[in-house]
Image (tube, grey):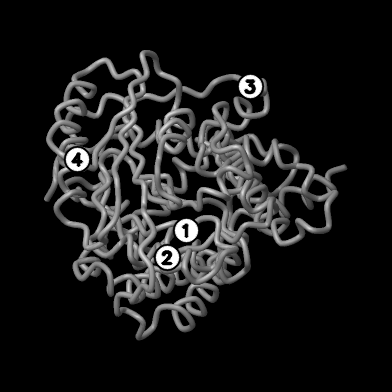
Amino acid sequence: MKTILLGIFQFVNDFVYIYPLFMAFVWMLGAILFFARREHNKSQVPKLDTFPLCSIVIPCHNEEQNIQKTIRWLTTSQKYPDFEIIAVDDGSTDSTAAILHDLTLKYTNVRAVYFRENQGKGAALTAGSLIANGDIIVTIDADSLLDQDALRWIVWHFNESTRVGAVTGNPRVLNRTTLLAKIQTGEYATIIGLIKRAQRILGKVLTVSGVMAAFRRQALESVGYWDTDMVTEDIAVTWKLERRFWDVRYEPRAISWVLVPETMRGLWRQRSRWAQGGMEVLKRNVDIFSDWRQRRLWPVYVEYLFSALWAYTFWILVFLWIIKATTGFEFGISLVPPIPPQWTGAMLALTCLIQFMVSAYIDHFYDKKLIKYLFWVIWYPFIYWMISALTVVVATPKALLKRKGTRAVWKSPDRGLGIS
């Protein structure tokens, strides 16, 4: 029994340190291939033969501080010639509804939908899409500022292939005033952007970005639009589309500037929602392994499942280490994790640095100031790994025990403290 326990602890110990090491190389290689094939020397805005009407849907819940700026920015900055804006007030308790009403009177291409009660982001997106006139539905958050050429880069994909059901853009951090925001500046470039590029090379992406994504109306209709009982409607709709064999693409040149949480409470709420939503999607799509046609989704599913397993093993090792450090209890065996081999720790640190450098090089084409935030990214493993791992541990039981059909309402997110 002692030998078996020792083997289990050693395996778990190695998994905690080697798994992120392995995945870092997968993400880096995939991102480099994506950059070489689809980004390098391709920065010129594409010329479009047709300009289909784009309907920009903005779900709002208590967004009085941001929504006016967002809509004004859209109406004045976009170089795309044909678009409309549909803002959906989802039962706000502040002055959001009144602001939207004034904006509809001021701008001819702005319309608004008003919910009396909070119905959830998925319901708001669906309502806005149902009254939209465009064949391309662009969804953005209420604090999202689209780059002037973002719509052109998105529409190019839909014009290029009728199989394209969705295109996700490239969110960039706008507020960079605190340590948390500066770390997220690097995270969005070195982690999120890297992973989306690699997933696209592998064939399927885990999720479109809730901050900014675009959908073909026909594709949304084929899957019944957004779910109202999923905490992360963006992940859920991505899987619905991909299971119906729609092509979901990542376009790094479709940039959107967003505000990120700058408090620990706001960050915890955001990451808990992401973690719970991810596990809800795994729960709902567990049957993909019974369908050979869904095999390209299998690696995405397994990778996310292993990430959740990693979170649990990480905190188990931390818990055991705390017990040993405080009580000296050895659990009847000589090895108590986490005690990684020295070469593993060194390799993990070196790989992390290489990953940040690769990502910084790729993304500096879109954010010239990114390199100066590279220093702050070194804190990512110490802060975000721990937070993300803990949110998975806490959120997984909620996702597994949640009854199907329970409406997922939302709260106004933490939009940060300011803009530097």
The image's mark for residue 405 is: 3
Instruction: Look at mark 2 in the image and give the residue it sits on.
Output: 251
Query: Of helix, strand and loop, which one carries label 1?
Result: strand
The residue at 83%/44% (across/down) is 2
Q: Which is more N-terminal, label 2 or label 1?
A: 1
The residue at 49%/67% (across/down) is 197
Disc 3 to disc 2, how far (Cα)?
33 Å
User: In the image, 354: left or right of 179?
Assistant: right
In this rendered view, identify the residue nearer to me: 33 or 60. Answer: 60
CB atoms at circles 1 and 2 under 8 Å apart?
Answer: yes
CB atoms at circles 4 and 3 under 8 Å apart?
Answer: no
User: In the image, 56: left or right of 137?
Assistant: left
Instruction: Look at mark 1 in the image and give the residue it sits on.
Output: 167
In this rendered view, identify the residue nearer to me: 308 or 192. Answer: 192
The image's mark for residue 267 is: none
Query: Whole-percent x and y of residue 236?
Result: 58, 41
| Amino acid type, mark 2 | Glu
Disc 4 to disc 1, how far (Cα)?
27 Å
In this rendered view, identify the residue nearer to me: 168 or 2. Answer: 168
Instruction: Look at mark 4 in the image and give the residue it sits on.
Output: 108
Looking at the figure, which quarter contains the N terminus? top right
| Amino acid type, mark 4 | Thr
The residue at 16%/39% (across/down) is 107
